[in-house]
Amino acid sequence: MTLPLILRRLAICLLASVTALHAAGLAPLVAGHITFVDGVVTVTNAAQSARAVQLGDPVYVGDHIQTQAQSHIYLRMVDNAFVSLRPSSELTISTYEFDKDQPQSSRIRLDLQQGTSRAVSGKGGQAAKHQYRFNTPLAAIGLRGTDYTVVADADKTRVSVTQGGVIVSPFGAGCSSVDLGPCLTPLARELTANMPNAFIEVTPNQAPRVMSGTLAQAAPATPVTVRADAAVGAVDDPAKRASLQLSIDRTETKAAVVVAAAEVSKVLSTPDLTPTPVVQQRSALAQWGRWSALIEQIPAGSPSLSTVFARLPDFQIVGANDSVALAYPGSASTSLPDQGRVQFSLVAAEAYVKDGSQFTAAGVKSGQLMIDFGLSNFSTQLAVVTSPNHIETVQAQGTVDAYGRMQSTAALSNSNVGGIVLNKGQEATYLFDKTLSLGSTLSGAAQWFR
């Protein structure tokens, strides 16, 4: 028997073993990965075993996720869906079966026991709306292809829609919590993004009502201060957490440099490698802020995370890297043009090299960004001066999904790039990071206008 044949049969046996374990319930299915975690978050598996979590960790079918006060977690699911949990929330990933070759056969169920969650459907939910369900203690939520927010506890469920639509029905005759898909009962109510100043409210023993206003007006969000330990997971030492919190509170930006967009290249090409934040004359929706550890070492630069996130109403976090985190207002529309190939202009950027715990400023000299809205993809390149005699190239190609989220494709890129396209395709902002020699990393943010 030849070696290739042996390897092939071994691979088939391994695949069969994994499949058998999944079928027997012994090997949990990966449902997604953590893209942002801030504060104290506990994940408990179906066997009631709790574990600590950090950025990049997988989450599995059967996992119960709980956020403590002032804590957040963001998940990217296997079908590219997005799920976030805000402070004091609990959610169980009850079912998440996705086949990329047959997305219409996907089976998805999420159960929010309490708190606030935002969900953006992925390929599985969009292709198999008849088998997608988001439950609360009182109601079943089905899809019309959507981006929605749910606030729930034992006494009340409220649902708002940013894009697409939902069907909300109270549990009862014809609507069970263990089923999949929307409940099409006489009590079901539908809400779409065409009603931006409305939400559905479900309370016990009453038919759902479509209410005027927003969820923020109905139930003000708990104030949140983003901490510097968010990118690497929770910190258990209370004294350390208090120190980190105090550090962020103290390190506000001291000055901002206002430069016209036409002068950006001149500013970024200066021999002084200290990054100079460029505040463009056109107001950008997406904004980034720096971790306190970076501000303590290099005071000049963009504002702190707490400053930036505090001024963004109902902020939605796009992602984070070693130096900065990116967010945008929750009310911002992420609808995009359905065609057109657009060259964007770089209007603001900053970058840093991190070696161990030490940061060094880098300078973004120039850049290019092309987005093809018809093909839903992008390509970008940045020239970053990391030392007086060296320029590092950040190069990436990737996809832009229906909700404006940018994500590089590893096989086509030398760096990881992730961001958001907003304002009907008029602006794009992304974070980037790249591993350099000897284990150091280059990271930062870049903002573009068309």
Image (cartoon, rainbow, N blue to C red):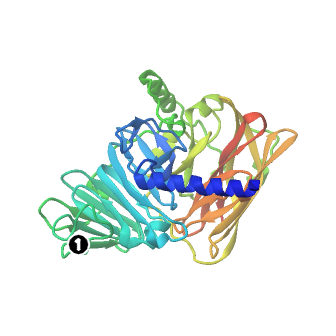
Q: What is the quadrant of the N terminus in the image?
A: bottom right
Q: x, y (%) of residue 294?
A: 62, 33
Pick the front one: 434 or 108: 108
How crowded pointer 1 is (Cα within 10 Å; few <14, some 14-19, many 20+) is rated as many
For this rendering, which residue is in front, 42 or 219? 42
Query: Count of labels shown?
Result: 1
Q: Position of residue 83 (x, y in %)?
A: 43, 55
- Tell me: residue 130, above or below residue 321: below
Tell me which amino acid carries mark 1: Ala
Which quadrant of the figure has residue 276?
top right
Q: Residue at x 20, y 68 (%)?
A: 209
Question: Residue 278 at what x, y percent from top left?
Answer: 66, 49
Secondary structure, mark 1, is: loop
Q: Nearer the viewer, residue 262 or 337?
A: 337
Residue that carries the numbered disc 1 in the rendered image: 188
Q: Tell me what residue is drawn at x 62 percent, y 39 percent.
A: 322
Relative to 306, say whether 161 is above or below: below
The answer to whether residue 104 is above or below residue 431 is below
- The answer to whether residue 198 of the structure is visible from this angle is no
Q: Residue at x 51, y 65 (%)?
A: 99
